[in-house]
Amino acid sequence: MKQRKFIPKAARVNAGLTMKEVAKQLGVTEVTLWNWERGATSPPIAKAQRMADLYRIPLDEIQFYRG
C-alpha cells in the first residue's frame, strides 16, 4: 500500500489549525511557518516532529520541499 504524503499546509488545514495557532505552539513567527509551508526553508527536525504531533500524523507523512 502506498503511503500518503501531505504538504505542511494541507496537514495543518486537515488538522483544523490556523497558522497563528501552529506558529504559537512551535514558538516561531507566522512568516517562518509560511516559509516552511511553501518550501522556501525546512524546519529543524524537532520542529518538524512537533508539527507532526500537532497535526496528528506521523512525521514521515509530511513532505517538506526545499525550493
Image (cartoon, rainbow, N blue to C red):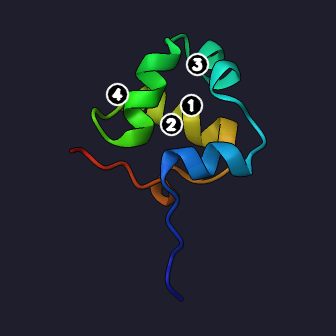
Secondary structure, mark 4, is loop
Q: Are marks 2 and 3 in contact (CB under 8 Å)?
A: no
Identify which residue is drawn at 46% across, 29% down. 34
Looking at the image, tell me whether mark 3 or mark 4 is earlier in sequence order: 3
| Left-right relation of 38 to 14 | left
Identify which residue is drawn at 31% across, 35% down. 42
| Left-right relation of 58 to 37 | right
Secondary structure, mark 1, is helix
> Label 3: which residue?
23
Secondary structure, mark 2, is helix
In the image, what residue type sits under mark 3? Ala
> Label 2: which residue?
49
- Marks 2 and 3 sit apart, C-alpha to C-alpha, by 14 Å
> Label 4: which residue?
44
Outermost residue to the right: 16
Q: Can you say which quadrant of the picture contains the C terminus?
A: top left
